Image: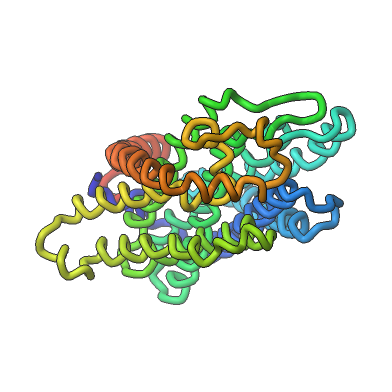
C-alpha cells in the first residue's frame, strides 16, 4: 500500500479562512443530503421488494427527495462560489464543486424522467435507464462530497472546524460506501424485469459482478478511511455506520428479515478489530507487524465481509451459482422468500464468500496505491501543483 497521505496531497495555502468556512458549510449540507438520499433510496428499493403499498408520499421518498433538495442547495452554493471566486476556480476544491453540480443536475433530471418512463412503459425494474440515471447522480454527489471534505481537512487549523469537518467526512464516507454498493446491486440483482423490458443481465454475469466489485468496494473504502484519518475510532465509526444504515433501510422494514438483525449487527465487530489492529492496540500485533502488513490484512478482512454486509439482498445475485436456487423455479415474489435459501445455504456459501472476498480484498490493496498515485499526478498536473503546495 502506498505511503501517500491523502489528506495532504493537495494543500493550497491561499484560500482565506472565510472562504474555507463557506466551503465547510457547503460540504456539510452535501454530506447530510448524501446520507438522506441513499437512505431513502435503499429503503424505497426494500419497500418495492416487500410489495408494500406504493404511493409517491412515502417516508422513503421523503428521505430521498429531502436529500436531493439539500444536494441541490449545495450545488447552487458551489456554482455561486465558482462563478464569483477566481481563486476557488484555480483550486483543486473546484473539482469537488463540479461533481456536486453535475450529480445534482443528473438527480433532478432523473425524477421527472422516471415519471415519464412509468407513464409510457409501465412498471419497470431496478436497472431501468431512469433508475441508473438517478443512482449515477447519487454516486457522483457522494464522490464530490468526500473529495471536498478530504481536501479541506488538511487546511483547517481551528479545532472546532476540524472536528466538524471530521464528523461530516465520516457521514460522507458512509454514504459513499452504500452508494457504491447500490451501484453494484443495480447491475447484479435479478430484479430488473419490468412490464415491457427485461434489463436483467445473465445470471453468471450478475454473480461475477457481485463477487468482484462488492469486496473491492469494501476494501477501497476501508483503505481510504485508514489513509484519511490518523486517529483511532474513525474506522469503527464508518464501518458501524454502514451496518446501521443497512439495518434501518433494508432489514427493519420487514419483521421476518429482522429476526436475523442481532447476528447482522455482529458484522460491525471486524471493523472494530481492524481499527484496533491499524493503530497498534492489539497486543499480539504491536511488535510483529508493519503498518503496510496491517493495511494489507485490513483490506482482506474488509473484502471478506461482503456477503454478510449484503444481507438480505445479495443472495438474490448469487442464487444461481453459490446456492441450489433458481428464482424462477421458486416463484420469487418478495424479499422474504429468500430467507429459507439464505439460511439453508449459509454453511456452504459463507466460507466460500470469505475466501473469495479476502482474495479480491488483497488485490484491491495493490490497486489502491496505484489509484492514489494516479489521482495525485492528474490533479497536480491539472492545477499546477508542486512540492511546495503539496506534501507526500
Q: Residue at x 38, y 65 (%)?
A: 269
Residue 19 visible from this viewpoint: no
The one nearer the camera, 387 or 321, is: 321
Q: Residue at x 62, y 51 (%)?
A: 78
Rendering quarter of residue 358: top left
The x, y position of residue 206, in whole percent, is 54, 30
Residue ID at (68%, 26%) = 199
Residue drawn at x 48%, y 57% is: 149
Q: List x then y, in percent, for residue 167.
A: 49, 68
Q: Which quadrant would residue 153 be assigned to in this image?
A: bottom left
Q: Is residue 141 above or below residue 241?
A: above
Q: In screen coordinates, is 159 left or right of 181?
A: left
Q: Is residue 254 visible?
A: yes
Horizontal side of 330 relative to 350 (left or right) equals right
Looking at the image, which is closer to me, 349 or 195? 349
- In the rendered image, residue 310, in percent from the top left (x then y), is placed at 52, 49
- Above or below, 149 against 335 in this view is below
User: Residue 65: percent from the left, percent from the top?
Assistant: 75, 54
Q: Quadrant of the N terminus?
A: top left
> Outermost residue, right direction?
119
Q: Residue furthest left?
A: 287
Amino acid at each position: 500500500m502506498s505511503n501517500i497521505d491523502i489528506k495532504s496531497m493537495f494543500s493550497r495555502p491561499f484560500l482565506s479562512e472565510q472562504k474555507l468556512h463557506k466551503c465547510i458549510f457547503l460540504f456539510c449540507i452535501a454530506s447530510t443530503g448524501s446520507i438522506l438520499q441513499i437512505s431513502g433510496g435503499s429503503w424505497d428499493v426494500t419497500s418495492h421488494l416487500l410489495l408494500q403499498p406504493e404511493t409517491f408520499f412515502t417516508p422513503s421518498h421523503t428521505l430521498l427527495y429531502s436529500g436531493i433538495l439539500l444536494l441541490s442547495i449545495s450545488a447552487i452554493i458551489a456554482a455561486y462560489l465558482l462563478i464569483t471566486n477566481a481563486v476557488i476556480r484555480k483550486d483543486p476544491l473546484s473539482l469537488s464543486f463540479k461533481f456536486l453540480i453535475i450529480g445534482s443536475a443528473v438527480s433532478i433530471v432523473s425524477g421527472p424522467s422516471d415519471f415519464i418512463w412509468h407513464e409510457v412503459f409501465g412498471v419497470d425494474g431496478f436497472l431501468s435507464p431512469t433508475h441508473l440515471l438517478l443512482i449515477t447522480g447519487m454516486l457522483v454527489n457522494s464522490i464530490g462530497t468526500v473529495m471536498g471534505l478530504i481536501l479541506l481537512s488538511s487546511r483547517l487549523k481551528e479545532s472546532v472546524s476540524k472536528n466538524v469537518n471530521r464528523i461530516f467526512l465520516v457521514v460522507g464516507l458512509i454514504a459513499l460506501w452504500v452508494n457504491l454498493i447500490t451501484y453494484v446491486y443495480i447491475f447484479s440483482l435479478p430484479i430488473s424485469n419490468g412490464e415491457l423490458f427485461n434489463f436483467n443481465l445473465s445470471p453468471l454475469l450478475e454473480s461475477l459482478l457481485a463477487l468482484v466489485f462488492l469486496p473491492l468496494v469494501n476494501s477501497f473504502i476501508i483503505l481510504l478511511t485508514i489513509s484519511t484519518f490518523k486517529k483511532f475510532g474513525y474506522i469503527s465509526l464508518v464501518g458501524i455506520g454502514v451496518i446501521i444504515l443497512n439495518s434501518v433501510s433494508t432489514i427493519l422494514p420487514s419483521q421476518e428479515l429482522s429476526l436475523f438483525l442481532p447476528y447482522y449487527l455482529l458484522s460491525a465487530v471486524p471493523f472494530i478489530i481492524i481499527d484496533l489492529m491499524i493503530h497498534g492496540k492489539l497486543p499480539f500485533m504491536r511488535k510483529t507487524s508493519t503498518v503496510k502488513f496491517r493495511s494489507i490484512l485490513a483490506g482482506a478482512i474488509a473484502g471478506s465481509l461482503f456477503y454478510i454486509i449484503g444481507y438480505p439482498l445479495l443472495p438474490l445475485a448469487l442464487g444461481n451459482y453459490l446456492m441450489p436456487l433458481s428464482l424462477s423455479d421458486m416463484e420469487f415474489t418478495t424479499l422474504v422468500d429468500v430467507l429459507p435459501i439464505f439460511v439453508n445455504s449459509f454453511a456452504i456459501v459463507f466460507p466460500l464468500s470469505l475466501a473469495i472476498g479476502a482474495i479480491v480484498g488483497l488485490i484491491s490493496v495493490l490497486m489502491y496505491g496505484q489509484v492514489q498515485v494516479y489521482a495525485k499526478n492528474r490533479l497536480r498536473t491539472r492545477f499546477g501543483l508542486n512540492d511546495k503546495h503539496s506534501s507526500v
